[in-house]
Image (tube, rainbow, N blue to C red):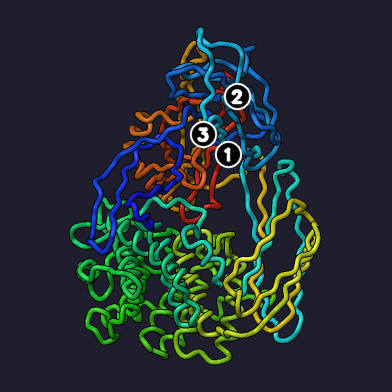
Amino acid sequence: MVLFRTSGFTDKPITVPDTITTWETEAFCLSSKGFGLAPRVQFTVFQPFFLELTLPYSIIRGERFILKATVFSYLESCMMVAVNPIPGSYTLTPVGGAEHTFCLCGNERVTRSWTLDTSNLGTVNVTVRAEAVASPVSCNNEIVHVPPRGRVDEVTRPLIVKPEGIEMSNTHNLLLCPKDETLTEELAVKLPDDMIPDSARAAVSVLGDILGRAMKNLDGLLQMPYGCGEQNMALLAPNIYILEYLEKTNQLTQEIRDRAEQFLTSGYQRQLNYKHSDGAYSTFGTGTGNTWLTAFVVRTFVKAKHFVHIDQANIDESKMWLESKQENGCFAMLGKLFHNRMKGGVSDNVTLTAYISAALLEMGVPADNEKLSNALTCLKESMNDLSNTYTTALMAYVFTLANDLTTRTQLLDHLNTKAHREGGLLHWSQTSAETSASLSVEISAYVLLALLGNNPGPNDLGVASNIVRWLTKQQNYYGGFSSTQDTVVALQALSLYSTLVYSPGGQSTVTIITPSGSQTFDVNQNNKLLYQETTFQNVEGDYSVSVQGNTCAAIQIALMYNVPTPTVTSAFKVDVTHKVDCDSNLLRPKMNLFFKSEYNGDQETSNMVILNIKMLSGFKPDSRSLKELEGALLVERIENDQKDNDHYLVYLKELPKGIPINHQLVVVQEREVSNLKPAVVVLYDYYQPSDSDETEYSYPCA
């Protein structure tokens, strides 16, 4: 606001950004005479000259590239400009013999180049400074001009320097709950012998709440792509469980509510892209409606209505579509089952019916509702075969919600005989030889929900705490788990447990001794949700974690490191070959990549598969070729990885067993990089990312 002098005029200096932009002013005034509105005025802001840097998004350690600095003049007159890099953790060698102080005349552009070399890993900030300087030397027979303002432009651009090989991560999670005592855990961390030198880094973090890590990463719980209707829901649903927990424990701040509600609103709008006209949803919004995904959407939207606007018509339409798929009590399986390993000794329809029944009960549909009652009857009739642990755990939760304590007890007693117990931890798996951590997390989470869903007593809470400690050990760096449904169900169960055992008081001191030294963290009622973290490079060795006090502490030691591209045999196989013209006269060299993807697992077809193609440093996909790949066999979608944008993710609907599937992509060199390192291509199971194969490809003309 400006107060005018008695003359009726005033000056108000305003600083505006120096980017070349046209601005429009608006002004109004209030006085004893009334309200006045000034006409709009436009003005253009620009600096006399500006600097632009050209460099790749990332390079692999050991690679070199040409850093280009281009200066653009917006003046009519000439000036003398000096362009110099600012020293940093890199080496710059001038290219050619051109002077880096030169004449820059009206509307000209001049480029100077250096070869950049760096061995520092991580993000390196590259800075170049351009300055108009006084000089007795004339330019084009003109006396050089030094502009009174804007005579310096300094630009800093980040360059990501990655280690060679493929990145691996390993997390150690602890949940320690002392009762006026000291609890201690010892860990011995050993890195693999083939680790890429200097690539290891670690982080230790402490929270006073087992959901705090997930809260910090509401928008990125998974190290997975987000390009389908199921994945979008896996991003949306945990927000609801966290909001419910915080609201019930009086910890919900306006800041957290605003942030979470923003995710809910945008997630809801995105999900409508996958909706069919009949109310069904499918993974990519095309083809047959998916009964499983539609039930997932409906149960989530009903809970989201408490926090954001959800059109009830969308819910009703989907619910009616689901009910129309009921046959003889059970629901018909339409669309692809989320995860092939869920299949077992019972039909898919039984598993689906249990899931839909849980959704209807969570929505508040009474157990004596005709449709729901028929579904529960279908489930009871299937109980002569409880060989599928996943379905059994899901049914235990269903009959807990339905308040059928007799059936619930029968199912929990059976599950008790199948439990894995070790070191005070408790979990379940589909089979005794099960290797799917994702499925084990989901099964164990359903058992936890069943235990907690009917006024749990001290014994139930004691058993639940052993499951919770195992679940928290499986969490990734972001507070989620390895896949979609395990993250959703596990966070639902953990939020329910946290609500039941929440105590607003208490204080504990966490002491962590690492190979780099010791660190102390305080956890109390004022900072339960505060994410406290320290990072260090000296990773390998013995770790000691102790917690003293009377409140729980969730501790995570996260390790990241690179290893050479693995050659371990898996159910998947990916090969990359190439065809390239090494003619040095080509302005933008191109390379044809040919990918052969193959599945040889124990199912007739794989789950959905991701082909993750990393670009060579300085390369990008040819836009026309990328468009053609989008329409290729079994390709559902292609997206640029938002977390690491030199990766392109190709969603493959499935891979048939034993039949190689071929695709191709043309890549173009945008930035010249020397000493090019190979790029990694990974083919992996969307629901079990550890089931994967990797290979490398190189540029033969480098």
The answer to which of 285 and 307 lies nearer the viewer is: 307
Q: CA distance from mark 2 to mark 3?
A: 31 Å
Quickly name the residue at label 3. 615
Toward the top, the furthest residue is 141
Quickly name the residue at label 1. 158
Q: CA distance from mark 2 to mark 1?
A: 19 Å
Q: Is residue 365 left or right of residue 206?
A: left
Residue 363: x %, y % from top left: 31, 78
Residue 657: x %, y % from top left: 43, 45
Residue visible at 24% across and 46% down in the picture: 39
Secondary structure of residue under mark 2: strand
Q: Amino acid at mark 3?
A: Met
Residue 401: x %, y % from top left: 38, 83
Res 406 visible = yes
Toward the front, the furthest residue is 7
Q: CA distance from mark 1 to mark 3?
A: 18 Å
Quickly name the residue at label 2. 83
Choose the circle earlier in sequence order: 1 or 3.
1
Name the front one of labels 2 and 1. Answer: 2
